[in-house]
Amino acid sequence: MDSLQLFLDQFKARGEAETVWLKEIFGFISEHLCPELSEPAPLAADDVVTGVCAGQLSVCLVKKLQENVAVTHVLPVSYRLVSVSALLSLQHLACVSNLSWTTNQHRAWEKEVELPGHQALPRVNLLLIGCLKEGRAGEWRLTDASGSVRCECLSLSPLWLNRPVFLPHWNYIPHNALGQNHEVRGYVELIGSPALLCPGPEQGFAASPGEGAGLSRAVGVREAAGLLYNRTRGQRISVFGLVASVCPQLVVAGTTFFCFWLTDESHTVRVLVKDINRQWWTQCVYVGLSVCVTELRVCVLRGWRGNDILCVTEQSELHTNYTHTDTLLDTPPPHLMSHVDSEDCEEVEPETDKAGLRMKKSRVISYQGTVTQVVSDGAGLYVIDRKVGLCLAYQPTLRRKLRAGDSVELHHVHFLYRPCPDFPPSMLCTCLRSSLRVIAFSGVGGAPPPDSGWLPRLLLEKNTGVSEYLWTCHLSSKLAHSLVPSLLKQRSVAVLSWKLMESVWRRGRGGRRDIYSEMLDEPHTCPLSKYTTGPKVHQYLSISALIGSLYSECWSSVSLSSLLPPGGSSLSRSQLNTALAWSCRTLTSDLQDGPQTGDAPGRRPLLLVGMLELPTQTSEPTLQLRDATGAVACVVTETSPDGGQRAAFNSAWIGCLVCVEQFTMVTERFLQSDFPSYQHLDQDKYITNKHCRVYLQFSLDSLHILSPSVAMATHLGQRGEELGSDVTDRRQTLEAEETERATTASRKRRREASSVTVTTNPVGGGFRPCVSLVIRVEQKEGVAQKNTAAALKVEEAGLTRCFSVKAVVVGPVVSWGRDPKNGPVTDKEMETEQEDKVVLVLSGGSARWFPLLQPGCFYRLTAPNTQDPRVLIGRGVSGQRGVELHTDPTLQVRSDWRLHTLTRPPLQALSPTVLSVSEVLDSRSEMVCFQAQVCDRISLSDRTSSPGAGVCAGVRLTVWDQSGRTLQVYLDFSHTPYPPGLLPGNTLLLSAFQRRVSRSGGVYCRSLPVSSITVTSLGDASSARPPSAPMMHLGVWAVRDQSGIVGQVRGHVVCFLFLQLEWSCSLCGSPYLQTCSSSQCLSTSSVFQSKAKLVMDDGTGEAHVWFSGALVPPLLGLADSQWEGLQRALRVRGHIRVTPRGRSLVCDSDDPLLHFLLCVCSSDVVCRQLSLTCRKTNQQRSEEMKRFSRGERDFMTRVTPPLQLTCLHLEDV
Ligand SMILES: [Zn+2]
Ligand SMILES: [Zn+2]
């Protein structure tokens, strides 16, 4: 009888549909499964045998299906068998199949497995059958005649190998279309056990005859451990025990192997599985399983210093769930943690690292949890149970990628607490000794986005610590957003991040990893045993994130009253609003001076990465740091060849990708307000306009160059040659690296796989003709908006940014076959008998060079795509030498011309005459160029005109030099861009300023349209105080004709000349009683003002010293409460003026307040030794004639007026 008919007879089909379905099953098995089964023994080639086989298998399958299906006695006709090849080629979505689910069960399952952002896998009615076979390197594959698919299983039994099976419950995960490896097609996740079709003879438990050291002679672990020490040559042993550890499968020099540990209560033995035909055991052994392994050989493992190890032989067999007749393996399963307590785990044994980071020891634990987030599959980073990080990077990559929703069991995993602040505090990290097993497959899809495994590859190569690795991974993910694609290629990001980590963490290549001792040694040591931790780990911020946080904190970080000077409550309206008009907040990148609130951009030191570039037409005339998210203006300085700080001058920095580690973030706040008095500061209605601007200050010397520009490579190469080996370590390595990068293109291509390549600023300019001219800048004008010739072009109509530079032409125009850029100066470029001068006019696009053109520096000006030297000759010059000219010729610099700073060979620079503050004060010339440190800055509000771009139109800077003399400089910004960096503490070069003398005789300076300001050295506000004002003797000071000087005086208070306390109107300054006394004003806001004048004697002479505001209460020795009481007492009468005439004055007044103040003024508390910092008042009274009467006679005498001083600071001696 036909086997199909026999089969159909066995299951009495109800209806046509069931008959068809049964026929399909039979047909499918004949076609796809039977050929596969007969393959090893090709005797089944004829149809009859196949028919018998198909009949038996079909009966078996349908019985299994009926067993599994939810409703009994019904055939699951809605399900159909699918061949492996059809599954792989047609199923493009991840799916789940479970024959036994009812609709309700399915819904319940969906609810259970769903995760935020991840849908449960869709259900399909597909049936899978096939043979489970061994694939490459320990894979299990489900095979039928059409093909095979990889199977991932939770636990496999060796009994299932090479057997036909039916899978009742499985997930199918198709290959990721974007994945790199197309061989890795989809795979099936086997949930639960497969159902064996036509079960064969039970294998294993009955030892087959001929087995030498088979199960019958199996020994326990203790006995096996003993045999390892006293082994007999050629002896084979069988061991049973509990699996204690399963190390990951490794491939070393083409050999695939893994090892596992067997244990009993007291002993352990290690078993090495090197046989390629036993690699499938990896999926059968797991921690806690009892097994018996037969036919093991004792061998010595080359490369491992430890004891002998048991090796699997070709005859070895694995028996799982083994129970030995004699011994009951009742060792309790290892303790599993499902949550980790931070307190519990912070087991610290601090040792201090040289970088100030603490070294901690990790703890080895076992853990069970569910993957909730795939942070980076490529980097091996996950989150378990929403709060515990998992790092698998120290193990080989898993064959099956972990998905969110997977339940995992980890044994011998390292627990680390706060290894990296960018990750969850609790981190689990696996090493080569750790066992990772998936105990339940995720029910959700959502394959993680593919990312390259560059970082683990670098880790394998460089072998750094885990804290460093985690930091690099986080940085890499951030940089991938902020640098790709505009500045970097994706693959460069990993290399760049690694390089950055090495320079920031000062790390090099770690020691070699000893894989055998890591897997097999006891006690265990590995790269994860120790890790660094500390709060000072740098935090990377993108430019836009940095700017965003600074803008958002601009006003929230400050209260208006804190912006006022001491004694701010006594300021009149105009003083108050002027004091508020400009303020500044500076934060250093290490955030040491930041507010203690901790909400600022973190309390960790900050790190920025970006490319240095010239300003655009619309941005501030400073260098910029740019990444793909934004750009920020930077005030930069650089160390000049003579060692001093100066403004950035080297054009080679343009186009360099750099890391900025030390910088200052500056937020300048501009506030237009009309507060009547101090009491109104909380009322926002008085603010008419407020805005802020943000920029950075740093020195170029503190940058790490991540990818140099071509010019920088040339510059460093030249310097490297010159300095030879005589440079510091860090520089040397940097230069060596950068120089190497600048070599030929072919070498570059070869290295491209690992080096960082900047995609912008292509290496252009080579092999193109150009002409050049070497110049030395003598003087630079400030940038102004001007109507220039260039502006006549349509696209630049109207006002354009413009400045000019006066320069000396060092040599003739030279033509080149290719752009010389900043290469060394040739003799040809220098041959000249006399130096001509030229005025370079830079406007529009070429005005971008402003930040880098500095007086005293040499530049090569190149005009591309021409061989005509005339383009570089200034107008009005015939081009022949020896022509006398009365005016300097001008040269309009076109926007495509380039300027390259020349540093080699060192050219003799003639610095322009730069004066100090003292020299300016004593000078007689009208135009001055001087350098000075800013100590104070106030905005000059011009209420009649609307300030440009909302920025105050004028600024008054108080600058000083080391002698302590000060000078006031008035800057007008109504027609020029507002320069950043005019901050207390910074040193400025003020060029072409007008020196003027006021009517009172004081010297001050003011800006002219040609004036320029350059920040030459960066300081912080705390350094805006000179070392200390010089000690002055009053006798000497009185006769020295110097204004603007601040000095310290130590002397005794002789007497009070007067003391005035009053409530006055904050608006008009009139006396105030309930309301303003002025009939025009009638204001209701008042301020309390105080003034005092006394006579001071230091033994060399006398002076009259003025005190006001906040200095008065400490002068009088009054506490805050007494001072407030005094203010209250004066509310009624408005003011009081006390004029004690010497100490001996008798108080005859009835006024108790006057009496009190008279007593205070003449008390020993007030008439004491004081140390004062004073400024000599500009207007000193000239000698005058005085008339005295003595009896009947009048005497006329010439009296030298006393020295007039204003006290700035007071200290008790
Ligand atoms: Zn370890
Ligand atoms: Zn008034």
Image (cartoon, rainbow, N blue to C red):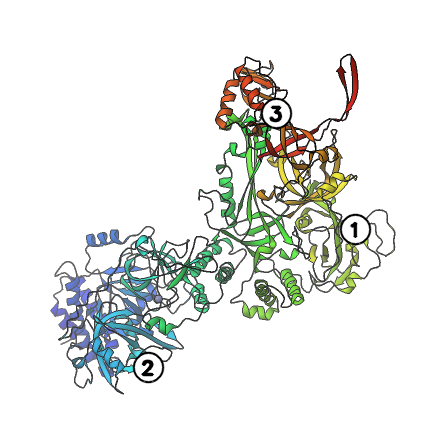
**Residue 300 badge:** 2
Residue designated by label 3: 1092
Q: Earlier in the sequence, mark 2 or mark 1?
A: 2
Q: Is residue 713 visible?
A: yes
Query: Few, some or many C-alpha atoms within 10 Å of disc 1 (few <14, some 14-19, many ≥20)?
Result: many
Instruction: Label 3, secondary structure: give it.
Output: strand
Left or right? Give the position of 865 relative to 523: right
Residue designated by label 1: 838
Dividing the picture into quarters, in which one does residue 759 lie? bottom right
Task: Give the camera-side residue of 556 and 1035.
Answer: 1035
Q: Work out which quarter of the rendered image holds the N terminus and state it.
A: bottom left
Whole-angstrom CA distance, mark 3 to mark 1, is 58 Å
Dividing the picture into quarters, in which one does residue 717 lie? bottom right
Ligand 2 found in image quarter? top right
Can you say whether 632 is above or below 1165 in the image?
A: below
Tags 3 and 1 touching, CB below 8 Å: no
Q: How many marks?
A: 3
Task: Give the camera-side residue of 1113 and 1079.
Answer: 1113
Instruction: Label 1, secondary structure: give it.
Output: strand
Query: Few, some or many C-alpha atoms within 10 Å of disc 3 (few <14, some 14-19, many ≥20)?
Result: many
Q: Earlier in the sequence, mark 3 or mark 1?
A: 1
Q: Position of residue 267 (x, y in %)?
A: 24, 73
Viewer-nearest of discs 3 and 1 = 3
Q: Position of residue 768 (x, y in %)?
A: 70, 63
Amino acid, disc 2: Val
